[in-house]
Image (spheres, grey):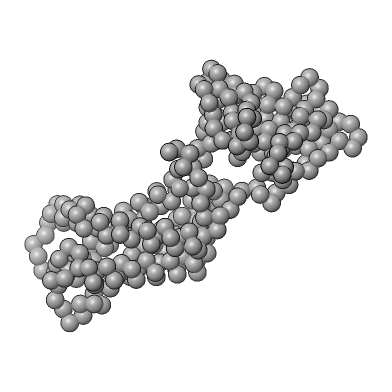
Amino acid sequence: MLDFLHKPIPFNTSVRNQLVIALILGGVLALIMIFLGPFDTDRFESNYKFSILGGFGVVFSIFYLLTGRLENLWYRSKQEQWTVAYEGLAFLTLVLLASIPIHFYNQVLLNDLFYQDYGTGAYISHGFWFFRTSLLPIMVILLPFYLYFRNRFGTLVTPGASAKVAFYGLNKGEKVVLPQDAVLFVKSSENYVEIFYAKDQETKHKTFRNTLTAIHEQVPFLQQCHRSYLVNTANIKAIKGNSQNAKITFHQNGLDIPLSNTYYKPIKSALRV
């Protein structure tokens, strides 16, 4: 279950595409309000009934665009990684923020808020009731459309996929250039290091004369996980065992390396980013 929450999914940074999604979702919400008549809106009478009910969609579209700007900042702060967990939090944030103006819109235009003796406490209490009994069911209906169109207009970005990193040895001509996302880990043994990487669905390695400290200076994105190992956390599949006897496993079958108690918490923290 936790692995699923960390699964990368497409994300959309384009304002144009966010506007398209906002209009589609707003239109769906407007149709729900007009034709399904939730929370007794089918009883609402007005010469401008369809326009007023369609206004719920306009309010939702506006707040989708506003939260989209916040999502872009969040996306950049996560090194352009977007996961199932982030998508779920983004939807909950949108629903919570949009519920405030939607409830206000409902009370003003459908329930004549300014002509009623409403105290602050009663208004807030009604807002919680409205959110729980009316808005949440509507959002559940809207959720599949939300997920589909965000996936349709989004782009799946693999951080570091196009970046190249170079490893150098002390001997003349000792050099290997690899895609950053192909690097698995580096192992040191006495005065030599072995660089393990994935290529053509196989695990390969190069041996250089150098120290682990020097290699870490060359490729600082790697993290130390043991006194003899550096690891690319982007390629870690899981951590097995507790802090006293932990191992790092990779997506390549049968491949694991030790994780010492000293670096257990930093590595675990990096995996949750």
The quadrant the N terminus occupies is top left
Give the residue displayed 68% in from the left and 42% down from the top.
Answer: 201
- Residue 156: name its quadrant: bottom right
Residue at figure coordinates x 13%, y 54% from the top left = 122
Q: x, y percentage for residue 67?
A: 41, 58
Residue lying furthest right in this view?
A: 172
- Horizontal side of residue 11 vs 123, given as left or right: right
Residue at 16% across, 78% down: 46
Is residue 183 something that shows in the picture? yes
Describe residue 177's horizontal placement relative to residue 25 as left or right.
right
- Front residue of 38/86: it is 38
Q: Position of residue 158 (x, y in %)?
A: 60, 50
- The one nearer the camera, 118 or 230, is 230
Q: What percent of the width, then of the height, locates residue 140?
A: 30, 56
Most foreground residue, 238 or 252: 252
32 relative to 176, above or below: below
Question: From what the image shows, is residue 12 above or below residue 194?
Answer: below
Residue 78's x, y, as percent? Answer: 53, 46
User: Residue at image x 35%, y 57%?
Assistant: 143
Where residue 55 sits, quadrant-wise, is bottom left
